[in-house]
Image: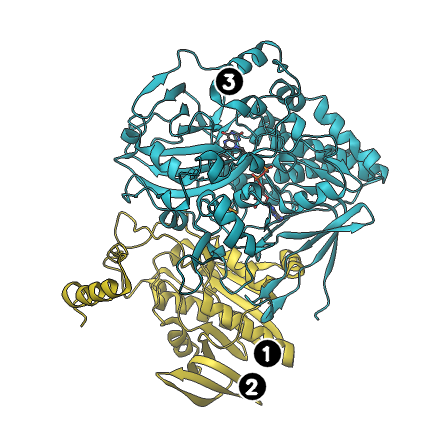
Amino acid sequence: MKIIVCVKQVPDTETRIRINPEGNGIVDQDVNWVVSPYDEFAIEEALRIKEAKGGEVVLVSLGPDRAQTALRNGLAMGADSAVHLKDAAFDAADTMGVAKALAAAIKGIGGADLVLTGQQGVGGDHSQVPGLLAGLLDLPQVTMAIKIELGEGKATVTREIEGASEVWETALPAVISAQKGLNEPRYASLKGIMAAKKKAIDVKDAAALGLAAADLAPLTTVASLELPPARPAVRMIDGDPETQARELLRLLHEEAKVI
Amino acid sequence: MAERDVLETDVLVVGGGPAGLAAAIRFKDLLDAHNAKNGGSKLEASVMVVEKAAEFGAHNLSGAVLDPVSLQELCPDFDAKNAPVSTRVTGDRVYFLTENRSFRLPIVPPPLQNHGNRIISLNQLVKWLAGEAEKRGIDLLAGFPGAEVLYEGDRVVGVRTGDKGIDKHGNKKGNFEAGVDVRAKITILAEGARGSLTKSLVPRLGLDKGRHPQVYSIGIKELWEVPKGTLPRGEVIHTAGFPLEEDTFGGGFIYGFTDTLVSIGLVVGLDYKDPLLDPHGLFQRMKQHPLVKPLLEKGTMVRYGARTIGEGGWYSIPRPYADGVMLIGEAAGYLNPARLKGVHLALKTGMQAAETALEALIADDTSAAKLKAFDDRVRSSYVKDELWKTRNFHAAFKNGLWFALPQLGLQEITGGHGLEDPLEPSAGYAEMQTLARYWGGGLGKDSFERPKADGKLTFDRLTDVYNSGTKHDEDQPAHLHVADPNICETRCKEEFGNPCERFCPAAVYEMVPKGDDPKQERLQINFSNCVHCKTCDVMDPYQIITWVTPEGGGGPRYDDL
Ligand SMILES: Cc1cc2nc3c(=O)[nH]c(=O)nc-3n(C[C@H](O)[C@H](O)[C@H](O)COP(=O)(O)OP(=O)(O)OC[C@H]3O[C@@H](n4cnc5c(N)ncnc54)[C@H](O)[C@@H]3O)c2cc1C
Ligand code: SF4
C-alpha cells in the first residue's frame, strides 16, 4: 500500500506573529516553524496503516528551504521518503496553486493508494487544499476523519460533525483529511532521527512538475491581515467572598454586559 | 515495557551550548585533519550532541560581551562566515548608582575593559555554531535531555536520554517513547551552570574533594527594541550599587546590541542574606533608575529570560575528568567572575576536551589517567591564567561591597592573592538568614510586597514568563522535585517565609491555601512556567529542591537573548 501524506510547515501557535509592512503576510524572522498538527495526525495514521498492512509512506511538502525540516521530522517519525516542492514561482501561489503543485507531484510519483492530509493548515486555516486536491486528482474525498479502517479497495471513515459523528465508506484511492482525535502522534525517536538523516529528499521545481507561471497565477489574494485586538489586562477582585461576588456580578452586568 | 534502544557513539556531548558545540566541532576538525595525514590508518569516530531544548540555541541566554579569542581559534574565518558577532564594543562606561543618582567611574576597572570585544546574543551564536556543526556532519539531537548518567562501576559509559510521553500521574501515554541509552567511549558534560547530571556526578566520583563549593548568581535579562539613536550600537554600560544593598553581590549591565536592540540585565549573587529579597523585583527597580529609564521608555520589551552563573572561579572547579568523562564550560565552572565572562572559556575548554578526546581514542585509552591531559591543557593555557588572577574575586565580597573594593584593588596588584589566599566562600544558600535574624523578628512573610508593574517599563513575572517563550507539555510529572513539601508548609514558611516564591524568576513556586483555614498553605509548583535557570536548585535554604530534566523540547525560547 502506497500512502502519500501532504505536509505543511506552519508557525508554532506560541509564535508571536508580526505582520509585514505590506500588511498582507507575516514576518518570517524569529518564527518557530513546525509541522502543522493536523498533518502530524495524517503522518501518524499513515505509519500505523503501514505497520499493520505493509507498504510505503511518502511525504510531500511545498515550501521554501526550511520546509525540509518538516519533512525530516516526518521521516524521523518513520516515513520512507519525501518530496520537496520548491520554486520561487510558488511564493505567490494561493490554495489552488498549491493544490495544483501537490496534485502534479502525486501524479509524478505514480499516484497512491491513499492520500492523507491534515484537515486544515494551522495558521491559514483555509481547509481548501484537500478538497482541491481531490478534485484535481479526480478522487473521492472524506474530510474530518477521526477513525480510518481499511478494507479491500475501500476505506470506512468516521468523521466528526457538529455534536456527533458519521461513518462513510469510500472507494480507494481517496483523499482523506485528518481531524484531531484520529490518533496520538508519536515522538520522533533518536534512532528515527539518525535514520532520517540518511534518507534523501527529492526536490522538484515547477518545471519538473510541468507547471508554468500561468498555472500558478493566484485566483485569490490576501487584501489585508490584522492582529486581533490586544486583550485587556486581567482584573483581580479583592475583598471577602461576599464583596467579591457582588463586585463580580456588578462587573458582569455593567461593564461586560453579559448578564 | 518497550525495549530500550541502545545507541553507540565514540564521543557524546551532553548540552549544546558554546562549550558543547565547540567540543564537537573541534573534535570533527581534528579527526578530519588526522585522517587526512594518516591516509593508511584512518580513525573512524562519531560524535553526537544531545540538547534538551527543542532547537539549538533556544535555551542559551547570556549578556553578552564576547572576548573573541577562542572563537578565533575554533573558526579563524568566523567574520567571513558571518558569525553573528558583528557588533564591536565602541564604548565602556561603569557607574555607581544610588537610588536617584549615578556616578560615573573616571576609569573603567581593568577587568571590565572591553576594547576589541563583541556584543553578541548567545542564542544567535549557538544557532550559528550548530549550523557549523551540521555542515561537518556531526549528529545534533535537539529535544533529547540527558536524564541519567550511565556508569559501569565508577566509569562513565554514556547517558540515558529522558523518556517521552509520560502523563502527570507518571503513567505512560499512548505515544510513550522510552529514553535511549547512548553509550559512548567518552562522555563530555557541557550542561552549563548547575547541570543536573554534573550535580550528581561530581560528588559521586568525589571530583569536588578539596575544592570550594561553587557559588552562583542569578542573571535576569530582557531584550528591548528601542528607537534608533537611543543607545549607540556597541556601547557597554555596567552598574554597581542600586538596586542592590551593599551586602548583596551583583550589578547591572546594559549593552547596545544593535542600533535598535538593547540588552539589559541584573546579576544578583545567590549568597544574599535577606530572605525577602526578590531578584525579579530588583531588576524592575533597576529599570526605573533615572540612568536607565530614558533608555527604555520609548521602547518595547521583546524577550525575557534568566539563568544562573557559577561565579566561584578557580577554587570552585571540580577535578574536570574521570574515567570516560570530562566536564567543560560552565558545567565545570570555567567562568571569569571579575569579567563576568564564560563564553570564551566555554569555547576554549570545549576545544581542549576535544583535543584530549581524539588523543585518547587514538591511543584507545579513555581512562582518567589519559583524560587528565585535559586538565593539563587547561592549566597551561590562558584559561588558568585568567582564572588564577581572579581566584579570590567572589570570595572578597563576603562582607559586602565596601569591604570588597580594597581587597579587589590589592588582588589586582598581587596577581589575585590579595590579603588572604584562598579566601574560603561558603555555599550560597547557607548565607540566607532567617526572617527573625535578618529582620529582627519585626518583619514576617506578609510584609513582603511585590512591586506593582506598569506593563510598559516594569512587568510582573507572568508577563515576563510569557516573553521567555517557555512552554512545557502540562501533562507530565513536575520536573521540580521537592523532597519534603512538609518543610515548605511548616519550617520554611516560619523561618524564611518561603523564599522560593521570590527567587524563582518565573513564578513557578506558589504557596496556595490548603483548605478553609487561610493560615494553612501548601506548595503549588507551576512547572510549565520554568525557564530552566536552576536558581531554586541552588538557593533553596534546605536543599530539598532538585531540578531534573523535563520532557525533551520543553523550556524557554530565547530568541536573540
Ligand atoms: C545574564 C548573564 C550574562 C552573562 N554575560 C556574559 C558575558 O557578557 N560574557 C561572557 O563571556 N559570558 C557571560 N555569561 C556567562 C556565559 O553565558 C556562560 O558562561 C556560557 O554560556 C557557558 O557556556 P556553556 O556552554 O558551558 O553552558 P550554557 O550556555 O549554559 O549551555 C548549556 C547547554 O546545555 C543544555 N543542557 C543542560 N543540561 C542538559 C542535559 N541534562 N541534557 C541535555 N542538554 C542539557 C542547555 O539547554 C544549554 O543549551 C553570562 C551569563 C548570564 C546568565
Ligand atoms: S523553577 Fe527553578 S529552574 Fe525553573 S525558573 Fe524557577 S528557579 Fe528557575
Q: Which mark is residue B403?
A: 3
Q: CA distance from mark 3 to mark 1?
A: 72 Å
Q: Nearer the viewer, residue B317 or A88?
A: B317
**Against B461, is B319 above or below?**
above
Horizontal arrangement in the rendering, residue B360 relative to residue B57 (left or right): right
Q: Can residue B531 be seen in the rendering of this structure? A: no
- Rendered hue of chain B is cyan
Q: Quadrant of the C terminus of chain B?
A: top left
Q: Secondary structure at mark 2?
A: strand
Of all residues, the one furthest to the left in this rendering is A254
Does mark 3's beta carbon lie closer than 8 Å to ligand 1?
no
Q: Can residue B166 be seen in the rendering of this structure? A: yes
Whether pointer 2 and pointer 1 mark residues with C-beta atoms closer than 8 Å, the reply is yes
Neighbours of disc 3 within 10 Å: few (<14), some (14-19), many (20+): some
Instruction: Name the residue that disc number 1 marks.
Output: A49
Q: Which chain is yellow?
A: A
Q: Which mark is residue A18?
A: none
Q: CA distance from mark 2 to mark 3?
A: 79 Å
In the rendered structure, which amino acid carries the disc numbered 1?
Ile
Residue ID at (61%, 73%): A56
- Residue B319 location (% of width, % of height): 73, 33
Do marks 2 and 1 both belong to one polypeptide chain? Answer: yes
Horizontal arrangement in the rendering, residue B468 relative to residue B184 (left or right): left
Residue ID at (40%, 31%): B257
Mark whose residue sits in front, 2 or 3: 3
Q: CA distance from mark 2 to mark 1?
A: 8 Å
Neighbours of disc 1 within 10 Å: few (<14), some (14-19), many (20+): many
Q: Secondary structure at mark 1?
A: helix
Residue ID at (72%, 62%): B5
Q: Chain of mark 3?
A: B
